[in-house]
Image (spheres, coloured by chain):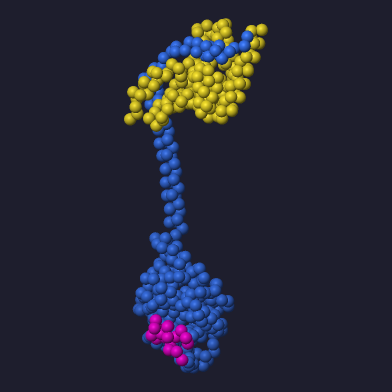
Chain colours: A blue, B yellow
Amino acid sequence: MSPSEFDLRAALHDDDGNGALDVDQLIFAARAHRSQRRTRILSTAAVVVAVAALGVGGGLLAGQGNSPGPTSGAAQANRDNAAASNGKAAGGSGTGFGSAGSASRQAPAGASLSGNAGCPTTLRSPAQASAASGPLFSEPVQSVVVCAYNAILAPRATSQTPRGHTVLRGAQATQLVNSLENAPTRRPQTMCPDMIRADASRFAFIGLGANGTHAGTVTTTAVNAGCGAQITNGTVTRYAWTPPSSLQPTLARLAPGTPAAGTVPIPSRTK
Amino acid sequence: MRDEEGFRSFVEANGATLLHAARLLTGDHHRGEDLVQTALIKLYQKWGRIEAPLPYARRALVNAHIDQTRRRWWGERPTETLPEQADLDSGSATAGSDSRDELRRILAGLAPRERAVIVLRYYCDLSEQETSATLGMPVGTVKSTCSRALARLRVEVTSGAS
């Protein structure tokens, strides 16, 4: 026997219509199913949100733990744009260049920095430096932040506020760095007067590399009219440094006691 | 708020047909009821967002049936101790000795997709295009599947008769 389509249809339709569905039970089951589904979705969403919150919170806490201060965000931005912002701050009041955060990030050991354009508030004394040879800056310097200070500390003062600061870039920065690096590595035989003029100045030169990275900070002793200064980065020391003649007007504006252009150091006495 | 009255009307009008189709697909009365409930719950979730409830219900029915026949690691597992036997004499679709019952018994032996094609084509009276749309397969596949299923039915019926 081979079933025809008619037989097949008849067989399939046999008992057709028997049985009825309970719609109320069906709707109740559908509502329960929907409720379970929503609960499951909400639970999953809650877990995802909790995990995300934990991740973000942990990341923020880790970021705060690694940053040097509360202005770490500004410090990062300033570090990235340090070279570009250096010029804008030239001659300004200290609001254009750097910040406490960037200064702290780039500060070498042994020099505490303030929020005043990244200038240090304490300068190394010459006795702290050894006479090791080598470069004063750790990498090629593209710009230099020049901070000027009074050579004489106020009584009982432990820190200094820079009297002024400026930024040198390009040829001026190169001239300054060359003069620093080419200063004598040995103490000169000539003697300088121990007396420091009241308007004498000390400087701190903060070298910045191409990307605004800190290349080193060089501090000077009092720059007197008649004698060169001793300069050091804390490890390497140079002697009898005098500012390049082309930069002396700039430095003189920052620190009136700086020798004017054309001044020739005159040894006062000899050993 | 869903149009619950519309859903009730739909179930009252088409519930029995869907239930019978589910019984044909599963070959079992109770599994058919479970299957149609699953399909109608899916329909209830989508009610108000679908334009053609009956094709949707048919498709949900067939998909749920094919999905249930897939082996899953969390599904039914073979066991040495058989569960309580169903009473085959209580009007089960697989019982009986006349030709119609024989046809339905043979139908239960087809592959799920072949069974779905046969039920949709010869019980729901869908065209090949409608069957194709319901099953989500090309019309050519519907034709070949239907042809293969009918050939198997003929062979089974002929061998059973001889």
Q: Which of the 4 image quadrants contains residue A148? A: bottom left
Q: Which residues are magenta?
A: A245-262
The answer to which of B123 and A192 lies nearer the viewer is B123
> Where, by quadrant of the figure, is residue A115 drawn?
bottom left
Residue nearest the viewer, comparing B130 with A37: B130
The residue that appears at 35% across and 79% down in the rendered structure is A154
Residue drawn at x 43%, y 74% is A87
Considering only vertical position in the picture, is A36 above or below B110? below
Tell me if I can see residue A46 in this picture.
yes
Q: Position of residue B26 (x, y in %)?
A: 53, 18
Residue A242 sits inside the magenta stretch: no
Query: How would you classify the magenta stretch by its main secondary structure?
Result: loop
Residue A250 is one of the magenta-drawn residues: yes
Asked if residue A224 is positioned above or below residue A59 in the image, the reply reads: below
Residue B104 visible (yes or no): no
B93, B139: nearer the viewer: B139
Quarter that holds the N terminus of chain A: top right
Closest to the observer, B78 or A57: B78
Image coordinates for residue A139, horizontal then vertical, percent: 55, 72
Identified at 39% across, 60% down, the residue is: A70
Spot occupied by residue A149 in the image (x, y as percentages of width and height): 40, 79
Question: Which residue sits at x=42%, y=61%?
Answer: A72
What is the tally of numbered marks visible in this picture? 0
Q: Position of residue A257 (x, y in %)?
A: 39, 86
